[in-house]
């Protein structure tokens, strides 16, 4: 195997007239340090193409009920373990995408199985409460032990929700309520406001706005969609708000070679943000909030510097707008810190931080000032799910006892160095390797090549995701270890060497 790899690389170099250098040796994994979770599988095992016959049969049946064009394959969640996702045809794949970044400690983690088997927990799984009015006795204690124990600095209030979109929707509402109360000062809302809001008119339904960024993704519900600008297919045919959209920096890689250009690009975007705020204010359409992802994920894993975010936070403050940080995808440890925005070193924390995915429950943390002033202003039937918090409590225990954030930093370094190494060897296929922790990505030259690479990798037993036009993104769980990174890099190397 190694010799065919060697000769392929040699041929390629000769064909391309490249300066000869020794082809990279294969990554040799240290023997895995076996913990409970590592007792998973030795590696991928492929029996059929993916999707295989059983998946295709099930797709055909599901197609009678709904559109299945987005379905990749059907899964066998009972057989899946740790970093390995098993499909219904018995194919076992190393999963670096983890259900769009939402499996914190791998499949069927023994600690989570124990939570479900504990008879004391049964009623929490069976009886889903309407949390806003009928919470269970242990609710405060559980919230304190779980979500509040990881609350971002400066945010002491928390509201749980069901998913990422409804977390952002309600964060928007909390920001608008806060903004209007600020405008009113101590005055009460008027009868005119109460009447006009019932027919969607000002002043009760005020013409205030939320500023978001080109390439951002905040969900697909109506309010969120107005702030989502990653792909037209998400937005087409849906009426929306005319809210300000600022450009997000387009950084050039490698960063160290483009320091001046990238700084200028960030300055340009920040100026545009301020211009938009002023322009909208002149039209009587004040910006109540700015929403941003620490790394624009669906939009193509677009990064900006810590300095950019610190300055943006200060612009929000200067103009009296709430600063909303959407950590639905970045939150939960994938960047090596529990919250990606911790990397920035903000003087004044974000006003709101939204979460979902790896935290199992959706929701948001917020500053005391954004606490709603009346009941039923932020409310729905479930407002989250205590059974998710129960499991999240165990997830946190595993993260802490197994030092998983440290693990993410170490494995992220192996993964990113490996990707940078590969882009040097295959400059015609790969560029712009980037990432924080294991939250990494790399670009293909175009969408078609990206899609081909993702499919080829899948048939070799590695699940990856795409994002933006041409990026491949890596979103392994927090129990992804160095030997998994080596395994992935070796398979990727083989695929790239073969790629025509
Ligand atoms: O295509 C889709 O609907 C996808 S693919 C990945 C997501 C959605 N991510 C969800 C997401 C997110 O990444 C960020 C930064 N903010 C909000 C959301 C919405 O969360 P959900 O999907 O739980 O409503």
Image (tube, rainbow, N blue to C red):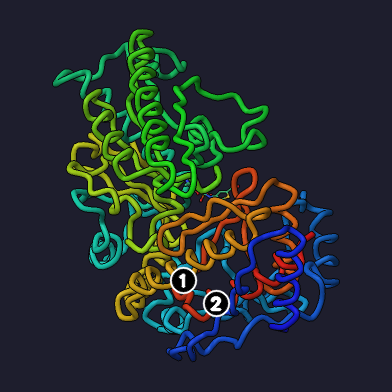
Residue at image location 27% in from the left, 66% down from the top: 137
The label shown at residue 180 is none
Q: Is residue 415 left or right of residue 121?
A: right
Q: Please tell me which of labels 1 and 2 falls first in the chain.
A: 1
* Residue on which the image places disc 1: 414
Q: Nearer the viewer, residue 494 or 160?
A: 494
In the rendered image, the residue lying farthest to the top is: 283
The Cα atoms of the two marked residues, 1 and 2, are separated by 8 Å
Image position of 177 with respect to 166: above or below: above
Residue 357 rendering spot, x and y as whole percentages: 47, 58
Residue at image location 62% in from the left, 28% down from the top: 238
| The image quarter in which residue 473 lies | bottom right
Q: Nearer the viewer, residue 201 or 263?
A: 263
Residue at image location 55% in from the left, 42% down from the top: 299
**Total marks in image:** 2
Q: Quadrant of the N terminus?
A: bottom right
Can residue 257 be seen? yes
Residue 498 rendering spot, x and y as whole percentages: 76, 67
| The image quarter in which residue 173 lies | top left
Residue at image location 46% in from the left, 64% down from the top: 438
Decide: marks 1, 2 in contact (CB < 8 A)? yes
* Residue on which the image places disc 2: 486
Can residue 125 be seen? no
């Amino acid at each position: 195997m190694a010799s065919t790899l060697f000769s392929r690389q040699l041929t390629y170099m000769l064909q391309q007239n490249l300066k000869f250098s020794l082809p990279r040796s294969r990554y040799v994994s240290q023997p895995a340090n076996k913990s409970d979770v590592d007792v998973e599988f030795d590696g991928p095992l492929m029996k059929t193409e993916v999707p295989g016959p059983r998946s295709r049969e099930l797709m055909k049946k599901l197609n009678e009920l709904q559109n299945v064009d987005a379905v990749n394959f059907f899964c066998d969640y009972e057989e899946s373990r740790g970093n390995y996702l098993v499909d219904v045809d018995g194919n076992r794949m190393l999963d670096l995408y983890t259900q769009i970044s939402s499996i914190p400690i791998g499949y069927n983690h023994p600690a989570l199985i124990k939570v479900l088997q504990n008879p004391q927990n049964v009623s929490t799984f069976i009886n889903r409460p309407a949390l806003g009015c009928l919470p269970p006795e242990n609710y405060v204690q559980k919230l304190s032990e779980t979500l509040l124990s990881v609350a971002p600095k400066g945010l002491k209030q928390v509201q749980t929700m069901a998913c990422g979109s409804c977390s952002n929707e309600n964060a928007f509402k909390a920001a608008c309520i806060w903004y209007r109360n600020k405008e009113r000062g101590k005055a009460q809302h008027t009868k005119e406001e109460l009447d006009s809001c019932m027919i969607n008119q000002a002043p009760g339904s005020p013409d205030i706005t939320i500023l978001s960024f080109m390439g951002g993704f905040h969900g697909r519900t109506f309010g969120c969609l107005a702030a989502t600008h990653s792909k037209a297919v998400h937005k087409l045919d849906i009426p929306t708000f005319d809210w300000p959209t600022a450009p997000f920096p387009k950084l050039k890689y490698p960063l160290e070679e483009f320091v001046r250009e990238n700084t200028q690009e960030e300055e340009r975007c920040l100026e545009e943000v301020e211009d938009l705020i002023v322009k909208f204010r002149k039209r009587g359409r004040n910006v109540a909030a700015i929403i941003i992802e620490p790394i624009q994920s669906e939009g193509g894993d677009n990064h900006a510097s810590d300095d950019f975010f610190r300055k943006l936070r200060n612009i929000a403050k200067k103009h009296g707008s709430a600063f909303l940080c959407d950590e639905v995808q970045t939150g939960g440890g994938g960047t090596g810190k529990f919250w990606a925005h911790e990397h920035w070193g903000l003087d004044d924390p974000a006003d709101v931080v939204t979460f979902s995915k790896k935290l199992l429950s959706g929701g948001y943390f917020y500053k005391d000032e954004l606490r709603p002033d009346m009941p039923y202003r932020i409310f729905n039937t479930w407002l989250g799910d205590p059974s998710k918090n129960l499991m999240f409590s165990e997830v946190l225990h595993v993260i802490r006892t197994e030092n998983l954030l440290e693990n993410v930093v170490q494995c992220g370094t192996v993964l990113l160095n490996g990707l940078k190494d590969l882009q040097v060897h295959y400059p015609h296929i790969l560029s712009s390797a980037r990432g924080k922790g294991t939250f990494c990505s790399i670009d293909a030259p175009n969408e078609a090549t990206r899609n081909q690479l993702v499919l080829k990798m899948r048939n070799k037993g590695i699940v990856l995701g795409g994002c933006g036009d041409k990026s491949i993104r890596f979103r392994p769980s927090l129990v992804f270890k160095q030997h998994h990174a080596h395994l992935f890099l070796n398979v990727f190397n083989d695929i790239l060497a073969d790629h025509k």
